[in-house]
Image: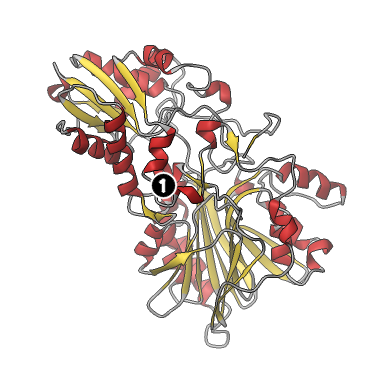
């Protein structure tokens, strides 16, 4: 593990004062050769909406061509019935004469690299000399700028500012095309986090980086059509059965020949699965890295109650992300669980006000305190994390005004002191409240009676197979990948036997 130099460019964070939480990354899905693939893809993306609310899209192949429907906004806003019908008609056209070689991939996005312009909406669709390709990517490539500079010198023109487009240019370059396995050769040139799907005219390929930063799972529908998704909750919604995780360093191919697998690299000696998937990002109903997310969060809360007990009258979650941890804390401590903060679900993320008074009003509109619950009570507030602290501070003021006699905050992860370079849009270091403040200074800033965070050791103690590796760099500053050193997988380029072949 090495500490990453601060010279690596970090995307700027433009957060609403109503939304002081970490930003999600992205979600991907894929369905091969099913008559309802477009509809199933839509359902899968809907289930992954929590992973990104900025943009969404589906791409479908048919008769050796690829078409797409993409746009900014939520899945339901972008993929309207009319647009879904257009894509479905395209996907199923000439079905009688060309019943095979048809696939769909999809993407729901929050930009962690490249900005939010419409040109960056995925799946990206391009045409290479041997046919069209579409790609959907969850993660962040830390060597994308280096490759853009090198490829631009070679005369290649970039149409987007997304790191994902680098993959297409690499795949189209003669260096990759002249190898026995162009996809594997391309992937070995990537540095950072990637769980991705690639749609070709005759197959879908899904791959996961050797460190396993982001989740990616394989499933099958009732007719044995294979599907890929970022989380198991999407498989559930699509009516698919979970088969297994895509292995770190693996490529899984979906085609008319069935499902096959090969490696482009050996798994990292120490995996770097993102612990924040369990702390915050993933859907509580999902099983991520072999462990149910809701159970993990309850365990975080239980461990927090063991490490940081306090006399109080009630335990309250900060909705919605603090609920599972608050349940665990209440159960372990024996203190009654009450919900005294009610969220307004009709206030959007883009509701930004310029003045301090208007920002405070916006917070009150987003989260309403029930005075009858908190008045004259000693309250424990449980939340999953604190990023900048501005929203939390305003909410604590409101709880004080409602008559709480004591406020004790308990956070179900350690302090976030470092930015993430692998697909989570944390703020720059100076915007992270824990980067330059002690726990006591944060407590004073928030205006509460006590503040405690779950310890790093306590967090890992509730994870299954923690010894195989989790990335906790946002808490420790120890990054698993150093951009100034070559990829470990570059020395593993020779062909390896497939993990399995299912004809």
**Position of residue 138 measured from the top left corner of the image (x, y, whole percent):** 55, 51
* Residue under the image location 42 percent in, 36 percent down: 457
* Residue under the image location 69 percent in, 52 percent down: 488
* Residue under the image location 35 percent in, 62 percent down: 237
Tell me, yes or no, if residue 157 can be seen here: yes
Q: Quadrant of the N terminus?
A: top right
Which residue lies most toward the right here?
154
**Position of residue 223 measured from the top left corner of the image (x, y, whole percent):** 40, 80
Against 291, is 452 above or below?
above
Q: Quadrant of the C terminus?
A: bottom right
Q: Nearer the viewer, residue 259 or 256?
A: 259
Horizontal side of residue 408 vs 239, given as left or right = left
What residue sits right under mark 1 in the picture? Answer: 50
Against 2, is 129 above or below?
below
Horizontal side of residue 313 vs 237, given as left or right = left
SS type, badge 1: helix
Against 98, is 188 above or below?
above
Are there few (<14), some (14-19), or many (20+) residues within 10 Å of tag 1?
many
């Amino acid at each position: 593990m090495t500490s990453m130099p601060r010279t690596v460019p970090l995307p700027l964070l433009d957060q609403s004062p109503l939304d002081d939480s970490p930003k999600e990354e992205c979600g991907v899905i894929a369905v091969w050769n099913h008559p309802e693939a477009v509809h199933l893809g839509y359902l899968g993306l809907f289930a992954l909406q929590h992973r990104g609310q900025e943009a969404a899209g589906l791409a479908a192949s048919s008769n050796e061509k690829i078409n797409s429907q993409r746009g900014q906004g939520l899945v339901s806003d972008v993929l309207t019935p009319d647009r879904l019908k257009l894509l479905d008609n395209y996907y199923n056209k000439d079905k009688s004469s060309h019943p095979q070689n048809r696939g769909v991939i999809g993407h729901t996005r929050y930009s962690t690299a490249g900005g939010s312009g419409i040109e960056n909406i995925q799946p990206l669709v391009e045409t290479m000399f041997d046919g069209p390709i579409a790609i959907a990517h969850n993660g962040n490539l830390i060597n994308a700028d280096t490759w853009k500079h090198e490829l631009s010198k070679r005369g290649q023109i970039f149409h987007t500012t997304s790191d994902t487009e680098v993959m297409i240019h690499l795949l189209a370059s003669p260096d990759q095309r002249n190898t026995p396995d162009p996809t594997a050769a391309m992937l070995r040139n990537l540095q950072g986090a990637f769980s991705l799907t690639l749609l070709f005219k005759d197959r879908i390929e899904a791959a996961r980086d050797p460190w396993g930063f982001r989740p990616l799972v394989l499933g099958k529908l009732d007719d044995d059509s294979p599907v890929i998704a970022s989380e198991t909750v999407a498989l559930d919604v699509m009516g698919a059965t979970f088969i297994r995780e895509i292995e770190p360093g693996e490529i899984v191919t979906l085609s008319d020949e069935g499902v096959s697998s090969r490696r482009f690299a050996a798994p990292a000696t120490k995996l770097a699965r993102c612990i924040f998937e369990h702390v915050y990002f993933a859907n509580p109903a999902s099983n991520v890295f072999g462990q149910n997310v809701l159970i993990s969060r309850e365990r975080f809360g239980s461990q927090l109650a063991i490490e940081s007990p306090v006399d109080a009258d009630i335990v309250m979650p900060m909705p919605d992300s603090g609920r599972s941890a608050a349940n665990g804390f209440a159960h372990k401590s024996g203190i009654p669980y009450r919900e005294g903060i009610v969220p307004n679900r009709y206030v959007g993320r883009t509701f930004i006000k310029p003045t301090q008074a208007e920002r405070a009003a916006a917070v009150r509109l987003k989260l309403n305190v029930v005075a009858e619950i908190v008045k004259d009570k000693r309250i424990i507030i449980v939340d999953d994390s604190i990023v900048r602290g501005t929203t939390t501070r305003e909410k604590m003021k409101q709880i004080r005004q409602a008559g709480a006699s004591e406020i004790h905050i308990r956070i179900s992860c350690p302090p976030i002191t470092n930015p993430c370079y692998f697909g989570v849009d944390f703020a720059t270091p100076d915007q992270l409240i824990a980067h330059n403040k002690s726990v006591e200074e944060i407590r004073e800033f928030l205006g509460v009676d006590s503040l405690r965070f779950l310890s790093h050791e306590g967090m890992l103690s509730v994870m299954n197979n923690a010894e195989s590796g989790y990335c906790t760099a946002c808490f420790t500053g120890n990054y698993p990948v150093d951009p100034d050193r070559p990829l470990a997988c570059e020395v593993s380029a020779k062909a390896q036997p497939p993990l399995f072949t299912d004809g």
